[in-house]
Amino acid sequence: MAGSLDFQGIIDLVGNKLREVFGTGNIGNQTGTTKQGNLRRPLYVYEHGVRLALPAMPPSPDGSFLRVLRSRKPLVVNTPAEQLAVGGQTPGTDLSLSAAVVPILAADRALGTISLDNFDARAWLTVPPKCAACRRCFLDGPGRSRTPGCSKRHSGC
């Protein structure tokens, strides 16, 4: 199926699958590089379950997009204040209560980011790290009963 799709079609297919896997209506996929003068291109952005069409824009020099591309490590912010401190709000979007941003890597290059935004009171880091692979455990947070079918056997989930 992917062989018959253009680049944006593949981005949409992957984005739709990620929204399904994580059970969220708040996800973004952006491309760009750390080169001077490069634009950050939002290719797939959903907020509150609605698709947004955002224009390409210069990345903030100290923002979360370039921070994640340079470090090649995920960035997690658990409060709106933390998000603003790392320049994490994209113009034209709402400020989320917490967010997780991960780099898209290909060999030795960072190509962009995928972000998951949280608009409710739960913070991302309240979830035990061992549990993050289980979608429901990840979204429901600690203290909930173990998700049926979850193969992880650990406490706090």
Image: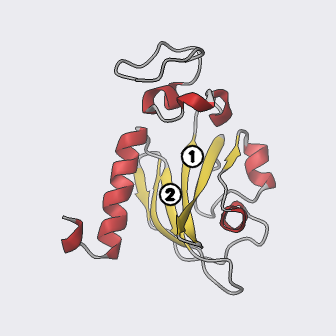
Disc 1 marks which residue?
Answer: 117
Q: Is residue 147 left or right of residue 108?
A: left
Q: Is residue 21 left or right of residue 60?
A: left
Task: Decide: few, some or many residues near mark 1? Use Cα within 10 Å; few <14, some 14-19, many ≥20.
Answer: many
Q: Is residue 112 above or below residue 98?
A: below
- Quadrant holding the C terminus: top right
First in residue order: circle 1 vs circle 2 = 2
Which quadrant of the figure has residue 129? top right
Residue 119 place in picture, x, y as percent: 58, 39
As drawn, the residue found furthest toward the bottom would be 37
Name which residue lies at 45% across and 31% down.
Answer: 134
The answer to whether one can see residue 7 in this image is yes
The answer to whether one can see residue 96 in this image is no
Quick one: 76 or 133, which is closer to the camera?
133
Name which residue lies at 54% across and 28% down.
Answer: 131
Which quadrant of the figure has residue 64? bottom right
Say what amino acid the circle numbered 2 marks. Gly
Quick one: 17 or 106, which is closer to the camera?
106
- Circle 2: element type: strand
Q: Is residue 36 above or below residue 153?
A: below
Say what amino acid the circle numbered 1 marks. Asp
Name which residue lies at 71% across and 44% down.
Answer: 77
Q: Is residue 131 left or right of residue 58?
A: left
Q: Is residue 125 above or below residue 49?
A: above
